[in-house]
Amino acid sequence: MNDNAQAMPLQIIKASAGSGKTFQLAYEYIKLLLGVKNDDGTYSLDKRSEYHQHILAVTFTNKATEEMKSRIVNELWLLSRGKGDYIKPLTAELHTTPQLLMEASQKALEEILFNYTTFNVSTIDSFFQTVLRTFAFELDQDYDYAVELDQDYSRKVAVQNMLLNVGGTSDRSDRVAGWLRELMKY
């Protein structure tokens, strides 16, 4: 994180279909992107334009992810032109003028579009896959894996891996070999 970035608490928004989740989530994202939280809990405009790299939005589906990204980019474009549904509430909540909000929105939009790969809106699945791959990399483990839902296949692979490890030189493989010998006596 850069010096201007601050740790933000996890924010969860629960709502049913058609209740305006995307509208509210995009609004909160843009508020975090353009604003800085003050000590008294209020927000004010902050002109840092690269802050999107420090915000993660997680959705359930790929469709919702694309809708969120599209909404955020579209609303930033509208804000940069002094238009849209967010201009009045953001001007009030960020304690700024429409002109300054337009300028900050334009800078943020440009930064997102020029560095789109760091625009972190993803599904829960892809977020956890990224976390798993990162941990595997940090632990110097093979991180080229696939998620398998076929239980029979998973059992076969687990038994094959266990049998491949039997007869090795470790105490663990000796214990497994002993356990298998005992099991075969019955």
Image (tube, rainbow, N blue to C red):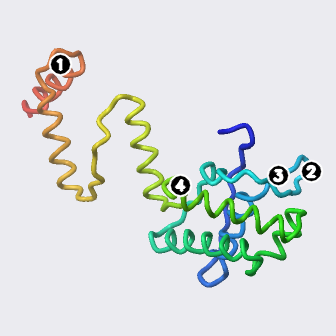
Left or right relative to 47: residue 186: left
* Tag shown at residue 115: 4
Q: Quadrant of the N terminus?
A: top right
**Residue beneath disc 1:** 174
Asked if marks 1 and 2 touch (Cβ < 8 Å), the reply is no
Quarter placement of the C terminus: top left
**In the image, residue 86 lies at what x, y percent?**
76, 75
Q: Are marks 4 and 2 in contact (CB under 8 Å)?
A: no
The residue where tag 3 is placed is 37
* Residue 147 horizontal side relative to residue 45, left or right: left
- 1 and 3 marks in contact (CB < 8 Å): no
SS class, disc 4: loop
Q: Tag 4: residue type?
A: Asn
For residue 116, the mark is none
Answer few, some or many: residues within 10 Å of disc 3's Cα (few below 14, many 20 plus, some between 14 and 19). some
Rendered view: 97 above or below 51: below
Q: Amino acid at mark 2?
A: Asp
Q: Mark 1 belongs to which amino acid?
A: Asp
Q: Identify the residue shown where x is 62% and y is 84%.
A: 18
Measured Cα–Cα span from mark 3 to mark 2: 8 Å
Percent of width and height locating residue 22: 62, 75
